[in-house]
Every structure is written in C-alpha cells, then in structure tokens.
Image: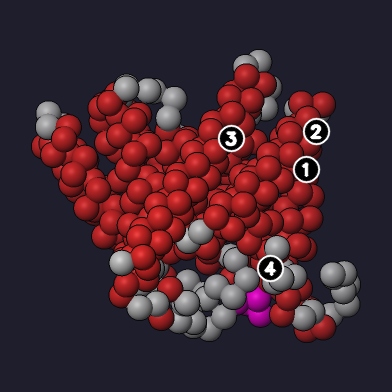
Amino acid sequence: MILKLGSRSELTTREWQFLRFVFGVTLSIALAYAINWPLSFVAPVFTAKFLAPGTPRIPLKLLVSILMVIATAFILAILFTKVLVQYPIVFMMCCTLIVFWIAYWANSGGNEFVITMLLVGLTLVPLLSFMHPALVTQVTLGLLFSCLIALTIAMISNELFIKGTSPAAKKTAQAQLDKATKTKLAMLTTVLIIPMLAFFLFNNLTGGILVIVFIAIMALKPDIVAGVQGAKALLIGNALGGVAAIVVYNFLIIAPNYTFAILVYASAICLFTLKILKEDKLAPIYTMALTTMIIIVSGASLGDGGASSKFYTRLGQIALACTYIIFAMFVVDWLTTRRKNRQSTK
C-alpha cells in the first residue's frame, strides 16, 4: 500500500487507518520511553487494541466509564487479596471462578480492553501482594495510567484521522456463540491461566510478572485457545515478534538516542501495519508479532548499562510463556479428543 501525497480527501479508508494506527502506537511508545512509569510497556499494547482496523471512535463518556470500572475492579482486587492472602487454597479457588467469569464475559461480546485490564490486574495484584506488597499500589497506578494514556491517544488519533474510524462498534463474533461454546472457551482460558498463576504464587517466583501478563493477554484470544492450529499461530507470531525485537534492539544499541529510537519503532510499526491492514488470514499473526516486539523491546532503557541483560531476560520470559501456552493447549486438545473418543465408543 502506497500512501498518496495529494489532498487529504484523496486518501482511502485503509490509508486513514494506516495513519491512525502508526501515529497512535508510535506516540504511545514515545511517551512510554520519555516518562518510563511502572509497566509503561503495556500502554502501546492497549493503544494498538483501540486503534486496530474497524474499531469505533471512543466518546469521552465511554472513556470515563472504562476508567471507573477498571479503577473499581483494581481496588476490589486489592481488598480481595488482603482478605484471603492467609488462605492460599481458598484464594486460588476464588481466582479460578473470577477468571472463568471474566473469560465467559469476553466470549459473550464484552469490551475487550476492559476485560484485558481486569484479567491482567487480577493476576498481577495477587502475585505482587504475596511477594512484593509494597509494589501493589505502584503497579496498580502504573496500569491505570497506561490505560489513561492508551485511551487518550486513541481519542486524539480518532479525531485527527476520523475517516479511519467506525461510527459504531459491530457485534463481535464472540457475542454470537452459543452457551456451550462460550463455556468451553472460558474453561480453556481458565486452564491456561490458573496453573501458571498458582505455580508462581506457591513458589514465590519474583520474575513472573511479565510471563503472567503475557499469558493473560494471549489466553483471551479465542482463536488461540480453541485448538492446536491456534497454538501453531501463536508460535509463528511470537517467533516473528522475537526476531523483530532482536533487530530493533540491535538498532537501538548502535545509536542509543531517543529520537532515533522512536524513528526505528515507527519504521517497524509501519511495516507490521501494512501487513495487518491486508486483512488476510496472516493478519492476526502480524498483530501478535507486533505486540510481542513492543513488550520485549520496551524493557531496554536507552543508555542503561544493564539493558542487554534485561532485554534477553524478557525475551526468554516471553519464550517461556509461549512454550507454556502451546504445551497447555496440546494437553487440553489431547484430553478433549480422548473424551470424545470415549463418548463415541459408548
């Protein structure tokens, strides 16, 4: 796709969407690098969700409502964790029920951004409360600030590139699923998240924050948790994102300059966006790769002597999370096939 340089009115809807997506995600990365608040790397990921092709404009009223819902949910998560922190078994049982409810809501057409924030918050708050109680408030505020940044940038981008937006949200395919399918997908998401959360909690592993966040984001995608083919797409998408992250990071360490870093990011985003906007069967893989690249590279601070170790640690954590999801998905698929075979022989 080649952008036209003539009048603004000559641009096609797809070209408007290209400009909107690249501008918004690049701006969020620029702010994340400049301010570097806790968990700032999630702001570009959330911004990309809001500015994906076909997403509607975000009214101010909806912005305020989303922030209020997320803030309330985080406060309740903190209180819930403090009450049950002394009862790990009861706590995990309650977490399982809540994750299942959130996943079921996701497959019933609920707001994807709100659901993602709730699931990330529900998994992060307990993990931090058990291991780093002093960081709970800091991380919660960081996530809420990332949410605010993403929503604000999305609103600005929609106003600047208004022809790339949709006037109203379309009914999602998830909302049209039958109850049995929704229940199955919710159970699969729960199976993917809860064992890893329990593993980090009961073993007091302090380096699991990124792994848990990544698993929570990926496990909400029905096309990933629905079968082995989705697991293969996950492997390809994250492998591509990992390679892109290595390339981008090596450019950054050659010239550790803020302006140069943003230009490198913008170039990578442009390349991925061109692939995403083709809207073919590979578009979700490129979307996944872009998300992976942002999460991995954003851990490397410019001019930080320990940036290389942080980068490769983060790369390894994403590989671990991806391996876990694929392994869990194969196990679930094997159990499901075995159950069907038993039922057919009766």
- Secondary structure at numbered mark 1: helix
Mark closer to the chain start, 3 or 1: 1
Q: Is residue 262 magenta?
A: no
Which label sits in the foreground, 4 or 1?
Answer: 4
- Kind of residue indicated by mark 3: Ala
Q: Label 2, label 4: how many angstroms apart (C-alpha)? A: 30 Å
Mark closer to the chain start, 4 or 1: 1
Residue density around tag 1, few if under 14, some if 14–19, many if 20 or more, within 10 Å: some
Q: Which mark is residue 264?
A: 1
Name the residue carrying label 4.
Answer: 281
Which label sits in the foreground, 3 or 1?
Answer: 3
Q: Residue at x 88, y 77 (%)?
A: 6
- Kind of residue indicated by mark 1: Val
Q: Is residue 164 magenta?
A: yes
Q: Is residue 258 visible?
A: yes
Evaluate if marks 1 and 2 touch, with contact meaning CB atoms under 8 Å apart: yes
- Kind of residue indicated by mark 2: Phe
Q: Label 4, label 3: how many angstroms apart (C-alpha)? A: 23 Å
Name the residue carrying label 3.
Answer: 319
- Secondary structure at numbered mark 2: helix
Q: Nearer the viewer, residue 243 or 18?
A: 243
Where residue 333 sits in the image (x, y, percent)? 46, 54
On screen, 43 above or below 132? below
- Secondary structure at numbered mark 3: helix
Q: Label 1, label 2: how many angstroms apart (C-alpha)? A: 7 Å
